[in-house]
Amino acid sequence: MRIDRERAVEIARVAAAREGHEWWEPIRVNRGWFRFTVWTNADHIGGNLIITVDRRTGHARVVGPTPK
């Protein structure tokens, strides 16, 4: 099953909450060949979460927050 953009954002939001991070809007979503990359707090430098979501399995990996 392929994951679409909306489902990737939902998975990313749950993964961030599971690790105790706040979800900051706006977000930016980039679709690659194998994964979606979701950036939170996208209009600012620093304090961003970067969550990658595998397009086939839905596995999410959270990186961040980035330094301010």
Image: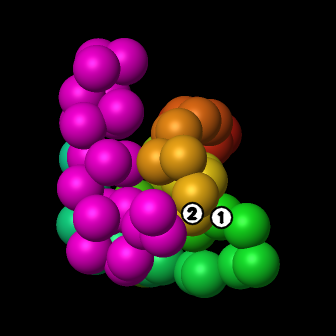
Classify the position of the C terminus by image quarter. top right
- Judging by the rendered image, the residue that carries numbered circle 2 is 55
Residue 35 has which mark? 1
Residue 24 quadrant: bottom left
Question: Between residues 65 and 37, which one lies in front from this camera angle?
Answer: 37
Residue range in magenta is: 1-22
Please provide percent x and percent y for residue 53. 54, 53
**Residue sitting at 28 percent across and 20 percent down?**
18
Q: Residue at x 35, y 33 (%)?
A: 15
Estimate the x, y position of residue 42 in percent, counting from the top left. 44, 72
Kindly indicate whether the residue at mark 2 contacts the one at mark 1 (C-beta within 8 angstroms): yes
Is 56 magenta? The answer is no
Q: Nearer the viewer, residue 10 or 22?
A: 10
Helix, strand or loop at label 2? It is loop
Q: How far is the residue under mark 1 from the one under mark 2?
A: 5 Å
In the depicted structure, whether residue 25 falls above or below residue 19: below
Q: Main secondary structure of the magenta part?
A: helix
Quadrant the N terminus occupies: bottom left
